[in-house]
Image: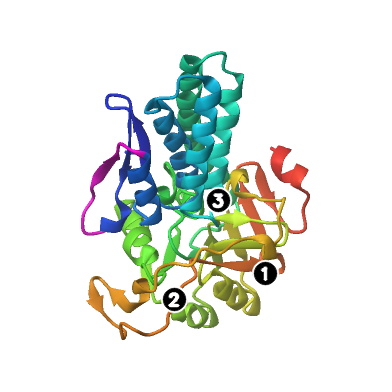
C-alpha cells in the first residue's frame, strides 16, 4: 500500500505509522487537522515527498470539515490552517509546497462545492504524481550505478519517505529492476534511527542486500574501499546547499576526501531557489530524543541537548542532483532543472 493516501469512504487521511517500524506495520487514520499535525511532528509520516502529499491532503481535510459559508471565508480559514500545517516541519519545503499547490488550484473555483472538489482532486494528484516522478527519477539515477556497486545511504529516502517507490532508494530499486546487483550500506541515523529502523526494513522486504552501520563508521568504510557511491535524499535544496537529515554533511566531507561520488536524489518540488542556506530555518527537535532510546534513559535528564533535525551540505560537496527531469551537476540554472526532460 501507499505510505500516505486518502480514504474516500471516511474522507480521512490514512498512513503507515513509521514510528512503530520495524516491529509493527500499522496503518493509522487522521480525521482532523490536529491529528495530522501531530502525525507530522512526531514523524509518523515523514520524508519530503510524503510531506508534500500530507500538506495537500491536510488542506482538503480542513475544507471538507469547514463550516465556512462563503468562498472568501473558506479561503481565509484554509490559509490559517495551511500556516499551522507548515509550522510543524519548517525546514521541509515540500510540506509548504503541497499546501500552497492545492490552495492555488482552488482559486479557479466558482463556488464552495467546486472548491472542495478541486482541493481534493489536486491533493490526490500530488500523491499520484509522486509515484510517477520517483520512478522517472529512479531511472535517471540508476544509470549512474554499475553492476555490483555498493551504495552508502543515510536516513530513509525510500517508499516510506514518499507516497511510494522512493528517491535515493528509488534509484537503487530502479537499478535492481534493470538487472544490476546493488549492495547497500545503511547508516543507522541517530537519534531516531530511521536508517536502522526503516531503510533496512524496506530493503530487506525487497530482498536487496543491506548492511547496517553506525553513523560514525561511514568514514571508515569509505577509507577501506567498501563504498562506490553515496546517495541521499533531501528535504530542501537551495541555490547553495542541500538540506537533509543531520549527519549528511559529514558523509559528504568523507566522500569528497575519498573521491567517492556523492549524489542527492530529490524531485523538483524539493528545490527552493528563492532562498540561500543562511535564510533557511533548521528545525530543532526535543532533547529527549537524545536523552532516551527506545524508552530507556541513556543520558542525564538535565543535560543540555542540541538536536537539529537537518544540516546543510554545500553544493561544492555534491557530485550531482538526480531529479525526475534528469541528472544535474552543480552549478546549474533553475530553468534547466524545471524544464529539461
Q: Residues within 10 Å of mark 2 (few under 14, many from 20)?
A: many
Q: Are marks 2 and 3 in contact (CB under 8 Å)?
A: no
What secondary structure is found at the residue carrying circle 2?
helix
316 displayed left or right of 98: right
What secondary structure is found at the residue carrying circle 3?
helix
Identify the disc placed on residue 292. Answer: none
For label 1, the residue is: 317
For marks 2 and 3, give the one nearer the viewer. 2
Which residue lies at the image location 54% right of the left edge and 29% below the top edge?
A: 75
Q: Position of residue 225 (x, y in %)?
A: 53, 78
Q: Is residue 26 magenta?
A: yes
Front-lying residue, 64 or 30: 64
The boundaries of the magenta stretch are 22-32
Which residue lies at the image location 34% right of the left edge and 51% below the top edge?
A: 206
For label 3, the residue is: 142
Q: Position of residue 18 (x, y in %)?
A: 32, 54
For label 2, the residue is: 215
For marks 1 and 3, give the one nearer the viewer. 1
- Mark 2 and mark 1 lie on one chain; the one further toward the N terminus is 2
Q: Which quadrant is home to the C terminus? A: top right
Q: Residues within 10 Å of mark 3 (few under 14, many from 20)?
A: many
211 displayed left or right of 152: left
Which residue lies at the image location 59% right of the left edge and 62% below the top edge?
A: 281
Q: Is residue 238 magenta?
A: no
Q: CA distance from mark 2 to mark 3?
A: 25 Å
* Magenta region, main secondary structure: loop
- Mark 1 and mark 3 lie on one chain; the one further toward the N terminus is 3
What is the total number of numbered labels drawn onto the structure image? Answer: 3
Amino acid at each position: 500500500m501507499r505510505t500516505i493516501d486518502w480514504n474516500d469512504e471516511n474522507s480521512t487521511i490514512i498512513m503507515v505509522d513509521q514510528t512503530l517500524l520495524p516491529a509493527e506495520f500499522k496503518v493509522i487514520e487522521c480525521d482532523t487537522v490536529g491529528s495530522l499535525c501531530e502525525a507530522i511532528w512526531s514523524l509518523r509520516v515523514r520524508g519530503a515527498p510524503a510531506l508534500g502529499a500530507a500538506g495537500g491532503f491536510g488542506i482538503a481535510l480542513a475544507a471538507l470539515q469547514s463550516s465556512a459559508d462563503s468562498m472568501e471565508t473558506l479561503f481565509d480559514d484554509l490559509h490559517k490552517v495551511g500556516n499551522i500545517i507548515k509550522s510543524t516541519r519548517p525546514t521541509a519545503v515540500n510540506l509548504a509546497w503541497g499546501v500552497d499547490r492545492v490552495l492555488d488550484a482552488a482559486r479557479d473555483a466558482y463556488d464552495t462545492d467546486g472548491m472542495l472538489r478541486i482541493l481534493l482532486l489536486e491533493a490526490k494528484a500530488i500523491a499520484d504524481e509522486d509515484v510517477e516522478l520517483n520512478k522517472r527519477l529512479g531511472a535517471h539515477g540508476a544509470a549512474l550505478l554499475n553492476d555490483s556497486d555498493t551504495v552508502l545511504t543515510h536516513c530513509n529516502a525510500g517508499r516510506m519517505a514518499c507516497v511510494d517507490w522512493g528517491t535515493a532508494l528509488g534509484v537503487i530499486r530502479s537499478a535492481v529492476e534493470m538487472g544490476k546487483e546493488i549492495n547497500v550500506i545503511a547508516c543507522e541515523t541517530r537519534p531516531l534511527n530511521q536508517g536502522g529502523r526503516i531503510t533496512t526494513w524496506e530493503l530487506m522486504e525487497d530482498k536487496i542486500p543491506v548492511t547496517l552501520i553506525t553513523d560514525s563508521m561511514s568514514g571508515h568504510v569509505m577509507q577501506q574501499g567498501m563504498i562506490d557511491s553515496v546517495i541521499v535524499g533531501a528535504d530542501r535544496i537551495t541555490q547553495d546547499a542541500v538540506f537533509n537529515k543531520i549527519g549528511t554533511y559529514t558523509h559528504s566531507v568523507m566522500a569528497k576526501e575519498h573521491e567517492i561520488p556523492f549524489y542527492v536524489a530529490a524531485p523538483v518540488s524539493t528545490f527552493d531557489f528563492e532562498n540561500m542556506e543562511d535564510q533557511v530555518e533548521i528545525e530543532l527537535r526535543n532533547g529527549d530524543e537524545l536523552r532516551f532510546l527506545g524508552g530507556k534513559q541513556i543520558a542525564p535528564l538535565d543535560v543540555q541537548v542540541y538536536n537539529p533535525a537537518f544540516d546543510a551540505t554545500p553544493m561544492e560537496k555534491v557530485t550531482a542532483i538526480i531529479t525526475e527531469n534528469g541528472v544535474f551537476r552543480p552549478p546549474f540554472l533553475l530553468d534547466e532543472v524545471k524544464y529539461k526532460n
